[in-house]
Image (cartoon, helix red, strand yellow):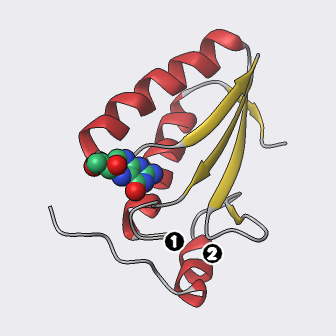
Amino acid sequence: MSRPVALSEAHVLEALAALDLWELVPARPAIRRTYVFENFIEAFGFMTRVAMVAESLDHHPEWSNVYNRVEVVLTTHDAGGVTALDLTLARRMDAFAQNASRRSDA
Ligand code: H2B
């Protein structure tokens, strides 16, 4: 697989315009979003689905879960920045969250 290339901040911001509720992490080359689900099972089901995709992309999120909340940070360590892989994973995550009973985007 070819090495991912870090995108410029301008390019990332442009991509974020189409990725509702994702934002730049302050002081880091990374993007983040918090998902809030109905309950723990919905949150963990989401994480399980994402885990399969992450593994197949060989691209893994930094994330944490507390009950119904999943906080996600995406960056490409190998490239030292945000790459197209992060945007792909973000879109795949959003698609899964749409199918879950997402309660809010707090
Ligand atoms: N995930 C993320 N988010 N960034 C990476 O740079 C990365 C990864 N690199 N998953 C991969 C695995 C690399 O460590 C292996 C060796 O392919």
- Residue 68 image point, x, y percent: 75, 20
In the picture, the quarter occupied by the N terminus is: bottom left
Residue at the image point whose x is 51% and y is 71% from the top: 81
Residue 88 is at least partly visible in this image:
no
Give the alpha-carbon distance from disc 1 to disc 2, as whole Å.
Answer: 18 Å
Q: Viewer-proximal residue, 41 or 63?
A: 63
Residue position for label 1: 81
Residue at the image point whose x is 56% and y is 78% from the top: 12
Residue with the most extreme right position: 106
Q: Secondary structure at mark 1?
A: loop
- Residue 103 image point, x, y percent: 76, 29
**Given this view, does label 1 or label 2 mark the residue nearer the observer?**
1
In the figure, residue 104 lies in which quadrant? top right
Left or right, 52 with respect to 72, comes to: left
Left or right, 11 with respect to 73, comes to: left
- Quick one: label 2, few (<14), some, or many (20+) residues within 10 Å? few
Looking at the image, is mark 1 or mark 2 earlier in the sequence?
Answer: 2
Residue position for label 2: 17
Three-letter amino acid code at the position of disc 1: Gly
Q: Secondary structure at mark 2?
A: loop
- Residue 40 image point, x, y percent: 69, 12
Residue at the image point whose x is 69% and y is 50% from the top: 33
Marks 1 and 2 close (CB-CB < 8 Å): no
48 versus 73 height, above or below: above
Left or right, 77 with respect to 1, comes to: right
37 versus 79 height, above or below: above
7 versus 49 height, above or below: below
